[in-house]
Structures are given as structure tokens and as C-alpha cells.
Image (tube, rainbow, N blue to C red):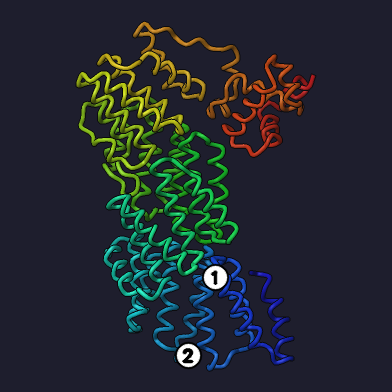
């Protein structure tokens, strides 16, 4: 909105001359309220900001202070819903200026509550608490207390010290005829329910969606869809709803929700082994979150960067990202366990340091309120002969795959070979979207299966060795080859050229033949020309192209060609000949 003051100045001068200033303020305000009700807070903030600016330029008399406060309240709501938290917090000075205007206590309490909401979502907990204390001191009427309790519950979720469940329930009980406050309370109660069970959480967010749709509250409907999308992703690894939320949020300028959904999509990309795509999502989201003052999102992105570095086995970058994560002092209690469980522990396992991985996981603790038991901890405990919980108690698909591997180890050790093999099949089905989970699980259970005489340990270890060799994880590949040699199993043969694949793409799972296709792209040939050069069919070239686009996280063929130039630029003349 930096370009607006000059335009509004000119408009104000014209309107003063024609005595139409009040009418212009009203038109901007009406349009802004319509966009806000329609769930388009970005556009609403622009229009409501213009209305406020017109009143400010006119040095509005005291009789207009109430109207200005009403506009400011709506503007704060629009800015918060749009994710423009920095701008919203800057309006605190405007609210302070109204303290001496003799406004009703309920009006001032409402403004202070909006400022507390903005500070809470920005991760500024002390200012949020101060604004709430001021709001309560104004002794508002009972219906206004519901708003204060709802935001206080939101703050308690992020800065423990109060009971968010009790505050949220009290707000919900007092907000029977206040649908927006009811939505705020249901949102808090749904998030709180993650500590007690997924079914109650889904029930709360379905109720939120119903209330939002009944009262045509577009923003809160999107919040409910986002939270339901989180549940679907956790339980089954499904991202369709999250992706739709991200697209809708971008269209409606709900940046905070869009960043939150994109953050989870970035974590999903890490778990699926799509590391370049994850890097791109993290960078894009960091820029948006930083500009908007979304402190909680920046904390989550710092956690995901830590996980990404750990999954790539990059110890030096992992140390740097952990230092940055600690420096941020991430407030959400579940972020630190996720960073260390999904980042540090996996990096140790890719270094074949099982003891360090388990020690790190034990230090983090047994259960995260959002994701439950770290599945890899259960597997390592089972391999060490320690007790584990049943897989049905593990809510996330990623972790459930490791919990099932752990159960298979226990069954095999107890002599239930057939049942152990069946559970391993279930683990592999759960791990289907996650190549690292599948291959690391196979590598870890193969020794136990060989020792206890169940399953197909030789085949499993051969598959894992091939994967870790191809993706450039030498410690695990070497350990697997050593075990195969000890067991007298045939060692996998290597195709000529495997060692010539650049490490940067080998880690993404690019095969020898895919690398050949990537090299040839430099000269911009068509699929038929590539097929003739490699003596394969055009259909096979199409499959290799689709695989390269997915593995390297590129949007199209031309971007893939640019990456090939970066990797093999010195071979341009040779490839074109």
C-alpha cells in the first residue's frame, strides 16, 4: 500500500472541494466489508485502509472517532486474515491515539484484542499478553469477553502458561450469537484437541467448517479446510486438500494460510525425497513469511530446513540449520522434537551411527502432541530389544511405516515368521510414497530378519544397497554390501557409468539412463532424436523425462535443460555433435 497515500491525498482534495468526503469513506468502507465477508482479506485491507486514510487526512472531528475506530477494527481484522501482521502491529500507534477520544470501553477493548491477535500470530507473545491485559482492564460487556478469551486461548496454545482448552470452551459458550468469535474458539479447540486425539480434532474442524459456511465466513471456511487438510496429510500422506488450500489462499490473498499450507507441502516434499522441490518451496515461503512478519511460519521453515539437511546426510549443513533453529528460539513445543527426530536422527542413520540416532531420539522424548511417537525411535528400540507401542497408536503415515517395521522385528524375534512377513508388507505399503522410509526400513530390519529366520533379508538388503549407492549415501551402501558378502548373497552388479552421475543429481535418485537423457537435453533434441541416439523407444524417453522432472523438482523441459547445462556445460559441443 506504499503507493496509496499520494493517490488518496489527491482524491481527498477533490472530494473536499465537492463536499463528498464522507460519501467516499462510506463507499470504500462498504466495499472493504464486502470483501472481508467474502473471504478476500487482502483486497478488503486495501479498501479499508483507504477509508481510514481519507478520515485521517481530513483531521476528522471527535464526532467521527467512533466511525474511525470501527474502520480501524475492520482493517486490523483484514490485515491479520491476509497475513500482513507487521502492518497490523504498526497500527498500535493509531489505537493508542484513540485512548483519549472518549470511546466506549467495548470499542477500545475490541481494538486491543485485535492487536493481541496480530501479535500472537506474529510470535510476539509479550506484546500480545499486554494488549489482552489492557482489554480486560477496560471491563467490557460479557459478549466482548468471549473475544478476549478466544484470543487468550490462541496465545496459550503458542506460549504455555494458561489452559487453552478452558479459555476456548468459555469463549465458545459465550459466543452463541457471535459466529466469528465462535469460529475463533472452535479453531483453538481443534488445535488443542491434537493433544487428546485425531477424532475430536476432526470433529471440531468439521463444526468450524459448518459454522463458517452457514454464516458465509470465507476466511474461516478456508481455515477449517486447511486444518482438515493437515489431518489428511498426517494420516494418509494425502496432499490434495492442502494444495487446494494453498491455491485458494493465493487467489484470496490469505497469505498466512497460504504460507502455512505451503510449509507442510515443503515437508511432504522432503519426506518423499523431492529435495530440490522442497528447497524451492522453503525459499519462496521464507521470503513471503519474512515480509509479512509470520514468525510461527518462519519457525516451521527453520525446522523443515533442518529435516531436509538431515535427510540428505549433509552433516555440516545440518549443524548450521540446527544452530539457526536454536537461535530463533522456536516457540511451538512440537517443532524442536520434529527437527531432531526427523533431521538429526536420520542424518546419524545415514552415517550408520545407530547408537547416536537412538540417543538423540530418547533425549527428545517419546511423544509429540501433533505427530505422536517418532516411528524411527520405535524401530530402533525394537532392534535394541526394547519394548515399543503398537503401530495403531502412531497417527502419521510416515511414522506408521517405521512402527510397522518395528512390530515385524518383534514378531520375527518371537518366532512368528509368517506374521512378521505380513506386517512387513503393511510397512512397505505405508512407506510407498516415501523412498527413504522404505529403503532405510529394509536396511534396518534385514539383519534381524536374517538372524531370526524370517522374510527375505537378502532381497531387502540388495534393494536398499542399490538405492543408497544410487543416491550417494556411501556409509549405508557399504554396510549393506558388507552384510551381503558375509551372508554369501550375490553382490549387485553395477551398470557402467553409475559413478559418472554427478553427485548433485545422484542424491535425487537419477539413474544412469536418466542421466544420459539429461546430458542430451543440452542440444534441445526432440524425444525421437534422443530415442534414436540411445537406441530406446520414444515412449521410454517420455517416461525418463517425467521421472527427471519429478526427481529434480523442475517445472518443465526447458528448466530441466538449464539444469543440464549447469551440470554438463563443458560437454555442450560434444553432445551437439
Q: Secondary structure at mark 2?
A: loop
Number of other residues with Cα within 10 Å of mark 2, as a class: few under 14, some 14 to 19, many 20 or more: few
| Quadrant placement of the C terminus | top right
Task: Report which quarter residue 120 is drawn in.
Answer: bottom left
Q: Is residue 136 visible?
A: yes
Q: Which mark is residue 292?
A: none
Task: Tell me residue 5's x, y (percent).
Answer: 67, 76
Task: Tell me residue 560's x, y (percent).
Answer: 67, 33
Left or right, residue 466 beside residue 346: right
Is 189 or 256 nearer to us in this picture? 189
Q: Secondary structure at mark 1?
A: helix
Q: Nearer the viewer, mark 1 or mark 2?
A: 1
**Residue appearing at x 53%, y 68% in the figure:** 79
**Residue appearing at x 71%, y 19% in the figure:** 531
Task: Tell me residue 103's x, y (percent).
Answer: 45, 89
Task: Report which quarter residue 131 is drawn in.
Answer: bottom left
**Residue appearing at x 57%, y 53% in the figure:** 247
Q: Which residue is mark 1?
A: 36
Q: Residue furthest right?
A: 577
**Residue appearing at x 47%, y 24% in the figure:** 473
Q: Is residue 314 visible?
A: no
Q: Is residue 448 above or below residue 283?
A: above
Task: Tell me residue 467's x, y (percent).
Answer: 47, 22
| Label 1 vs 2, first from the N-terminus | 1
Is 328 or 381 nearer to us in this picture? 381
Is 232 or 412 nearer to us in this picture? 232
Q: Is residue 374 above or below residue 191?
A: above
Number of other residues with Cα within 10 Å of mark 1, as a class: few under 14, some 14 to 19, many 20 or more: many
Q: CA distance from mark 1 to mark 2?
A: 27 Å
Q: Is residue 154 above or below residue 362?
A: below
Q: Which residue is mark 2?
A: 101
Amino acid at each position: 500500500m506504499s503507493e496509496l497515500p499520494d493517490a488518496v491525498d489527491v482524491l481527498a482534495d477533490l472530494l473536499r472541494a465537492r463536499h463528498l468526503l464522507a460519501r467516499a469513506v462510506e463507499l470504500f468502507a462498504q466495499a472493504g466489508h464486502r470483501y472481508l465477508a467474502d473471504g478476500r482479506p487482502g483486497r478488503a485491507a486495501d479498501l479499508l485502509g483507504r477509508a481510514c486514510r481519507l478520515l485521517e487526512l481530513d483531521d476528522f472531528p471527535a464526532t467521527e472517532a467512533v466511525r474511525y475506530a470501527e474502520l480501524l477494527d475492520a482493517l486490523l481484522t483484514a490485515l491479520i486474515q491476509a497475513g500482513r501482521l507487521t502492518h497490523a502491529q504498526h497500527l498500535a500507534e493509531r489505537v493508542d491515539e484513540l485512548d483519549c477520544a472518549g470511546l466506549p470501553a467495548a470499542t477500545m477493548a475490541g481494538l486491543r484484542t485485535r492487536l493481541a491477535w496480530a501479535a500472537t500470530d506474529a510470535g510476539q507473545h509479550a506484546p500480545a499478553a499486554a494488549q489482552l491485559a489492557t482489554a480486560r482492564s477496560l471491563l467490557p460487556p460479557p459478549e466482548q469477553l468471549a473475544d478476549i478469551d478466544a484470543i487468550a486461548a490462541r496465545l496459550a496454545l503458542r506460549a504455555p502458561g494458561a489452559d487453552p482448552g478452558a479459555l476456548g470452551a468459555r469463549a465458545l459458550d459465550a459466543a452463541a450469537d457471535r459466529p466469528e468469535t465462535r469460529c475463533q474458539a472452535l479453531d483453538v479447540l481443534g488445535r488443542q484437541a491434537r493433544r487428546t486425539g485425531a477424532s475430536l480434532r476432526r470433529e471440531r474442524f468439521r463444526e468450524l467448517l459448518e459454522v463458517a459456511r452457514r454464516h458465509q465466513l470465507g476466511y474461516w471456511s478456508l481455515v477449517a479446510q486447511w486444518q482438515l487438510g493437515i489431518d489428511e496429510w498426517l494420516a494418509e500422506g494425502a496432499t490434495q486438500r492442502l494444495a487446494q488450500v494453498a491455491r485458494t489462499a493465493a487467489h484470496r490473498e490469505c497469505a498466512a494460510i497460504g504460507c502455512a499450507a505451503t510449509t507442510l507441502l515443503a515437508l511432504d516434499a522432503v519426506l518423499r525425497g523431492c529435495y530440490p522441490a522442497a528447497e524451492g518451496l522453503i525459499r519462496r515461503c521464507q521470503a513471503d513469511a519474512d515480509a509479512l512478519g509470520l514468525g510461527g511460519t518462519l519457525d516451521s521453515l527453520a525446522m523443515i530446513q533442518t529435516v531436509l539437511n538431515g535427510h540428505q546426510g549433509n552433516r555440516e549443513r545440518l549443524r548450521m540449520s540446527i544452530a539457526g533453529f536454536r537461535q530463533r528460539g522456536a516457540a511451538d513445543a512440537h517443532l524442536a522434537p520434529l527437527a531432531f527426530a526427523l533431521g538429526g536422527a536420520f542424518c546419524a542413520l545415514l552415517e550408520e551411527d545407530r547408537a547416536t540416532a537412538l540417543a538423540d531420539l530418547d533425549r527428545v522424548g517419546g511423544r509429540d502432541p501433533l505427530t505422536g511417537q517418532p516411528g524411527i525411535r520405535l524401530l530402533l528400540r525394537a532392534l535394541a530389544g526394547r519394548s515399543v507401542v503398537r503401530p495403531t497408536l502412531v497417527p502419521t503415515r510416515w511414522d506408521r511405516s517405521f512402527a510397522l517395521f518395528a512390530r515385524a522385528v518383534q514378531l520375527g524375534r518371537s518366532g512368528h515368521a509368517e506374521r512378521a512377513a505380513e506386517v512387513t508388507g503393511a510397512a512397505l505399503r505405508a512407506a510407498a510414497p516415501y523412498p527413504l522410509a522404505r529403503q532405510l526400513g529394509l536396511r534396518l530390519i534385514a539383519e534381524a530378519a536374517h538372524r531370526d529366520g524370517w522374510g527375505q533379508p537378502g532381497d531387502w538388503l540388495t534393494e536398499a544397497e542399490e538405492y543408497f549407492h544410487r543416491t550417494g549415501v556411501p556409509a549405508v551402501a557399504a554396510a549393506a554390501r558388507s552384510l551381503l558378502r558375509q551372508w554369501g548373497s550375490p553382490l549387485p552388479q553395477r551398470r557402467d557409468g553409475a559413478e559418472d552421475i554427478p553427485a548433485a543429481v545422484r542424491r535425487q535418485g537419477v539413474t544412469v539412463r536418466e542421466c544420459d537423457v539429461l546430458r542430451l537435453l543440452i542440444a534441445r533434441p526432440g524425444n525421437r532424436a534422443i530415442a534414436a541416439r540411445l537406441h530406446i523407444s520414444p515412449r521410454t524417453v517420455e517416461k525418463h523425462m517425467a521421472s527427471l522432472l519429478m526427481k529434480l523438482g523442475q517445472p518443465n523441459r526447458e528448466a530441466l535443460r538449464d539444469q543440464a547445462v549447469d551440470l554438463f556445460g563443458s560437454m555442450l559441443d560434444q553432445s551437439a555433435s
